[in-house]
Amino acid sequence: MIFRAKIKLTDPQIGADQMIPVTEQILKKVITPRPAESHKGNYGRVVVIAGSHTYGGAGIMSASAALYAGAGLITLISDLVNRTALHAQHPEIMFADWTDQKLVTQLIDGANVIVIGPGLGLDNQAQELLTLTLSQVINAQTLILDGSALTLLSQTPEKKIQSDAQLILTPHQEEWHRLSGLNIAEQTPAKNQEVLAAKFPESTILVLKQHHTQTYADGQIYENTSGSPAMATGGMGDTLTGIIAALVAQFKQPVDATVTAVYLHGLAGQVLAETQYVALPSQLILELPVLMAKYSLK
Ligand SMILES: NC(=O)C1=CN([C@@H]2O[C@H](COP(=O)(O)OP(=O)(O)OC[C@H]3O[C@@H](n4cnc5c(N)ncnc54)[C@H](OP(=O)(O)O)[C@@H]3O)[C@@H](O)[C@H]2O)[C@@H](O)CC1
Ligand SMILES: Nc1ncnc2c1ncn2[C@@H]1O[C@H](COP(=O)(O)OP(=O)(O)O)[C@@H](O)[C@H]1O
Ligand SMILES: [Mg+2]
């Protein structure tokens, strides 16, 4: 049994010792062998809206991570300048120009999981894409908000975020500072729970990234135990968004899938750190299918 104590949303005394540690058992529980009679449509349609002119790599890393973590069909919606670079690396991933609003709307409508934010930037185009996405998603979909999308949301702090979709937020501590108003020293479990409940729909999952990432969901807090300082490289969080998207798309239960994705990401980093001083995101994704095969066999 991996998950222990239940933590009440309102408990002001919640401390680090009451978090639920996540271990490799979660991989065995969630990652299951693929049924022989299945096809790409069974493993989810993921759309990644990411990667501006300046931060093209972020979109490519997110979409590539979704590919290696097993999503059935993936489309990167991005600045047109990123298309050739994407296809030079991963022709398996489809591409759409993010200025084509009709196509973007169709792709969002057809997706099971949408990622928005890695390297999105903060300009009008980015804001329009975020507004369109938030208004377009429905309750059968999962929307993962990361990077620039979180920074854009924090520019209207008075507004409670409304969305019918299952939301997953993946801020690092500074992004959570901008969103929550809590500086890093104030980011205690109780305060984080309080702000999450006040500003976001009840089902929202918060993945607060750090050395031992904390996932807040259903009134509980899961503390990740995998990972390595070798992972402290730009693009590592962009990569996590794709892994979460792929696992939600395949294994459906969003809390389990998210906690598993965070653990798997850290474990892949740890595997690289056994022989490397630094773990690059583009190397980390190569470990994912290997680890997933290993743990699916129990
Ligand atoms: N190759 C690409 O295309 C890449 C594209 N990217 C995209 O760029 C966009 C901007 O994202 P961003 O994270 O780089 O910048 P920003 O939001 O200003 O935050 C940095 C500030 O936060 C602070 N900080 C505090 N705690 C922290 C923590 N635990 N983890 C991390 N930071 C922490 C930190 O503190 P300091 O370094 O000063 O100590 C600093 O002051 C975004 O869309 C992203 O997806 C990147 O992924 C890189 C590769
Ligand atoms: N020292 C560390 N130990 C474990 N994980 C780390 C460490 N440093 C960074 N990470 C992980 O790397 C990722 C960094 O995310 P983020 O800051 O959003 O990166 P980026 O935006 O550059 O892609 C998070 O998942 C975080 O948990
Ligand atoms: Mg980031």
Image (cartoon, helix red, strand yellow):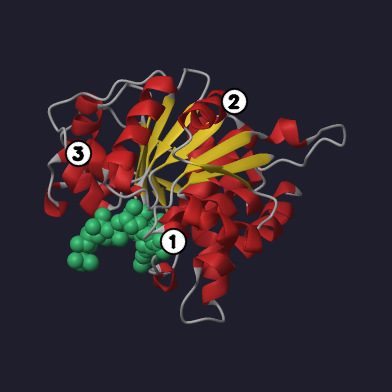
Q: Are marks 1 and 2 in contact (CB under 8 Å)?
A: no
Q: Nearer the viewer, residue 218 or 106?
A: 106
Q: Is mark 1 within 8 Å of ligand 2?
A: yes
Report how far apart the C-alphas of labels 1 and 2 lie in the structure: 27 Å
Which is more foreground, mark 3 or mark 1?
3
Residue under pointer 1? 236
Query: For residue 179, what is the image quadrant?
Result: top left
| Residue 65: percent from left, percent from top | 57, 54
Would you say residue 218 is visible in this rendering? no
Mark 2–mark 3 distance (CA, rounded to whole Å)? 28 Å
At mark 1, the secondary structure is helix
Q: Can you tell which mark lies on residue 154?
A: 3
Left or right for 227, reference 18: right
Residue at x 27%, y 40% (from the top left corner): 124
Considering only order in the chain, which callout, 1 or 3, is on the residue closer to the N terminus? 3
User: In front: 1, or 34?
Assistant: 34
Q: Nearer the viewer, residue 236 or 21?
A: 236
Name the spot of residue 183 as percent of width and height, x first. 12, 50
Q: Looking at numbered disc 2 in the image, what kind of residue is underneath it?
A: Gly
Residue 274, compared with residue 27, is above or below; it is below
Q: Position of residue 99 (x, y in %)?
A: 44, 39
SS type, badge 2: helix
What residue is at 55 percent from the left and 50 percent from the top?
A: 63
Residue at 72 percent of width and 56 percent of height:
294
In this view, 225 is above or below 8: below
Please state, as top left, top right, bottom left or bottom right, where the N terminus lies in the image: top right
Q: Nearer the viewer, mark 1 or mark 2?
A: 2
Q: Amino acid at mark 1?
A: Met
Question: x, y percentage for residue 166?
Answer: 44, 25
Q: Amino acid at mark 3?
A: Ser
